[in-house]
Image (cartoon, grey):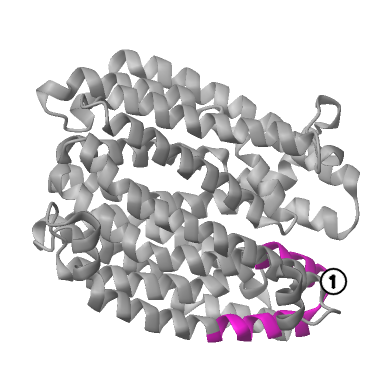
């Protein structure tokens, strides 16, 4: 059935397009499941935790995700280098890139775990996360468990990059779906226990997050990806520069994303209080569905653009870009509809437990439309590795986002909507260069910084 659908929409001679479209279909089904779980899981969190403890959980989870930043961009560096090696049919080089990236991230993971264990001696995490007195012991234990279980994931998650670089993002999406299903089951079981514990929740969620990528590494590297499975003899640290050169640019760009998104919950907690975090998080989950579903379409084209650019297949790139522009107009209409029906959706979803301001909904909607529209250019530029201007943009965003978020949230009295407004400002800055650079590269007229 899927093969017939692919044949209907993509020319048989376009093998690259057929592969991308097939994985878009697979990913779409998985994203629908993930979206349903995302809606079902919030009431379970609220049934198990109080509003304050849920806010702390969200904030700690966001802060922990900051540590993804310390892969120095090597995950995305591997993604591009692996795709280039595959395009050249060089399996030995692809295996060496995989092995070297795993080795480097294992070393970084061990170092991070050591630093955390030292920091744990000196810091009271309950103070940092503004926990009330009765939650202090629970919060401190939760942070330790989550950190220890997180560190191995640092390198185990690389299997997702290998699959995505092979233009098979549905594998990564399948892993996410399995994790989310297990989260839902675990939360349902915990919600029936009647005695909320952040420590117990951390054991369950952290354990699931570790187990799934571990099993995926064993399954895929002993099966389909046996030829490129990491091995000590294939580690070549001379490739570190190649991985980290491109990786450094992704590192800075990830840093900007870290500052923009991962600090939001912490800023809201410190400026407005942890009780304001759930409303922001729920609105973000609702509108971010558009970003997620648009991303499932654009993600397969990252590595496809890499291959097409290496082979100088500009007509194919032009054709795909036009289709993505058309798709975005449909997304814009959907975003507006979601804004107007949001109060009714929230009422069905969480009842009247948490109030979501309409100003927050409006800013979220605009952010979603800007993010999805500009992601078309961002995916292309990332795929072809022309990121110097994006690097400069990321540095500017890192400098201005936190102070702007604090001012808009606190001093201008916009509340949590002000935090998202600061993020929107950073996104809109990309309008000044990404579309123009993309058109120049496709036309072959990019020179100087436009070609770097």
Q: Is residue 114 above or below residue 392?
A: above
| Residue 43 visible from this viewpoint | yes
Please tell me whether the stretch drawn in magenta is mainly helix, strand or loop. Answer: helix
321 relative to 100 in the view: left or right: left
Q: Is residue 439 above or below residue 128?
A: below
* Residues rendered magenta in the picture: 301-326
**Which residue is denoted by mark 1 in the rendering?**
311
| Residue 78 visible from this viewpoint | no
Residue found 9% across the figure and 58% down from its top: 411
Residue found 76% across the figure and 70% down from its top: 3
Q: Position of residue 438 (x, y in %)?
A: 61, 78
Q: Position of residue 362 (x, y in %)?
A: 23, 73
Q: Is residue 364 above or below residue 89?
A: below
294 relative to 308 in the view: left or right: left
State yes or no: residue 303 in magenta: yes
- The one nearer the camera, 439 or 391, is 439
- The one nearer the camera, 15 or 431, is 15
Residue found 77% across the figure and 78% down from its top: 7
């Amino acid at each position: 059935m899927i093969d017939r659908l692919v044949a209907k929409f993509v020319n048989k001679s376009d093998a690259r397009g057929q592969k991308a479209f097939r994985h878009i279909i697979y990913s779409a089904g998985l994203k629908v499941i993930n979206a349903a779980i995302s809606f079902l899981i919030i009431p379970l969190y609220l049934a198990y935790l109080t509003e304050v403890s849920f806010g702390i959980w969200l904030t700690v989870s966001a802060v922990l995700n900051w540590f993804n930043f310390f892969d120095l961009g090597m995950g995305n560096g591997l993604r591009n280098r692996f795709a280039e090696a595959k395009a050249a049919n060089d399996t030995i080089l692809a295996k060496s890139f995989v092995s070297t990236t795993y080795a480097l991230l294992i070393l970084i993971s061990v170092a991070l775990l050591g630093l955390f264990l030292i920091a744990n001696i000196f810091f009271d995490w309950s103070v940092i996360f503004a926990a009330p007195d009765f939650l202090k012991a629970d919060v401190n234990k939760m942070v330790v468990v989550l950190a220890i279980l997180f560190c191995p994931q640092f390198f185990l998650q690389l299997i997702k990059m290998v699959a995505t670089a092979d233009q098979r993002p549905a594998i990564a999406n399948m892993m996410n779906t399995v994790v989310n299903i297990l989260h839902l089951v675990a939360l349902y079981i915990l919600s029936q226990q009647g005695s909320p514990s952040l420590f117990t929740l951390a054991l369950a969620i952290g354990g699931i997050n570790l187990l799934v990528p571990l099993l995926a590494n064993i399954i895929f590297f002993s099966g389909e990806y046996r030829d490129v499975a990491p091995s000590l003899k294939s580690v070549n640290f001379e490739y570190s520069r190649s991985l980290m050169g491109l990786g450094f640019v992704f590192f800075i760009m990830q840093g900007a994303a870290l500052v923009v998104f991962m600090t939001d919950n912490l800023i809201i907690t410190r400026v407005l209080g942890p009780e304001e975090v759930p409303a922001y998080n729920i609105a973000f989950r609702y509108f971010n569905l558009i970003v997620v579903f648009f991303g499932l379409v654009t993600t397969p084209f990252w590595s496809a653009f890499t291959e097409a650019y290496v082979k100088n297949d500009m007509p194919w790139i032009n054709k795909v870009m036009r289709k993505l522009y058309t798709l975005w107009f449909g997304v814009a209409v959907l975003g507006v509809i979601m804004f107007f029906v949001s109060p009714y959706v929230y009422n069905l979803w969480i009842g009247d437990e948490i109030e979501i301001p309409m100003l927050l909904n409006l800013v979220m909607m605009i952010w979603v439309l800007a993010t999805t529209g500009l992601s078309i250019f961002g995916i292309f530029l990332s795929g072809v590795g022309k990121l110097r201007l994006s690097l400069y943009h990321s540095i500017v965003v890192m400098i201005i986002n936190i102070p702007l978020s604090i001012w808009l949230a606190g001093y201008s009295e916009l509340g949590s909507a002000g935090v998202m407004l600061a993020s929107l400002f950073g996104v809109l800055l990309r309008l000044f260069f990404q579309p123009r650079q993309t058109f120049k590269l496709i036309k072959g007229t990019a020179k100087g910084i436009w070609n770097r």
